[in-house]
Image (tube, rainbow, N blue to C red):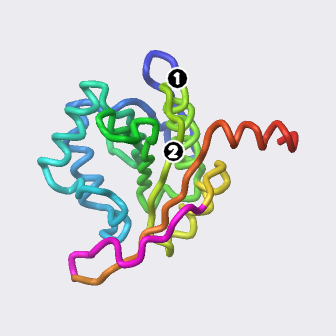
Amino acid sequence: MVGGKEYLMTDVTDIAVRAPGRSDAQALARFAAAMPPHDLLFLARDIREPKVLEAWLTAQEQGQIASLVAVAEGEVVATIAAISDRFSWSPHVWDVRLLVAPDWRGKGLGRKLLYQIVTDAIAAGAGKLTARMTPDQAGAITLFEEAGFRAEAMLLGQVKAADGSLHDLAVLSLDPAGAAARREAFGD
């Protein structure tokens, strides 16, 4: 990225990819509100809540997380974040969270964001990356597996939807050093 902003060209419009800022708060709120509720189940917190959105933007400003938004025609169409808890027993583990608006899926946007955030997290010292999603999110699982993530765990009944139904949570992980060694060994 140059100057914190990168532009992607699609057949529909130009997309700006950059770190989110305070000026994106309303667009992020609209994006979160428009997402299918099932797509939000893997998040530790509900980004539709104003306090959660505020905490996200504050953490971004303070450099506590790395996140990007993809903006098309003034609206957020995708977002990704890599989060590490520096005060935990596992500060080397960064959790990756990717959301792409339904109309923007299958266009390569998620792949571009995932590549960028993984690159940024590794450069910042991530020793392991994880991603969580419900097992029925086949497209997301495929995307992460193509990026080198592997299934690590299935947490049964881990998340509860607003209607009270329980859903399993798949956990995938990427070991950057191991992935690089595999690529080197197999000439990928």
**Total numbered circles:** 2
Q: Which residue is drawn at 31% across and 71% down?
A: 159
**In this view of the protein, which residue sits in the foreground, 131 or 46?**
131
Q: Which residue is drawn at 46% across and 60% down?
A: 103
Residue 109 left/right relative to 53 = right
Can residue 71 be seen? Answer: no
Q: Which residue is drawn at 58% across and 39% down?
A: 115
Residues shaded magenta = 151-163
Residue 149 highlighted magenta (yes or no)? no
Q: Name the residue under label 2.
A: 129
| Label 1: how many Cα within 10 Å (few below 14, some 14–19, many 20+) | few
Q: Where is residue 175 in the image (x, y as percent from the top left)?
A: 61, 44
**Residue 148: numbered disc:** none
Residue 164 position (above or below residue 2): below
Do the residues bearing badges 1 and 2 touch, measured as CB atoms within 8 Å? no
Residue 125 position (above or below residue 170): above
Can residue 42 be seen? Answer: yes
Residue 165 position (above or below residue 21): below
**In this view of the protein, which residue sits in the foreground, 27 or 86?**
86
Residue 18 left/right relative to 74 = right
Disc 1 versus disc 2: nearer the observer: 2
Q: Where is residue 104 in the image (x, y as percent from the top left)?
A: 48, 55
Q: Residue 82: which quarter of the image? A: top left
Disc 1/disc 2 C-alpha distance (Å): 21 Å
Q: Name the residue under label 1.
A: 1
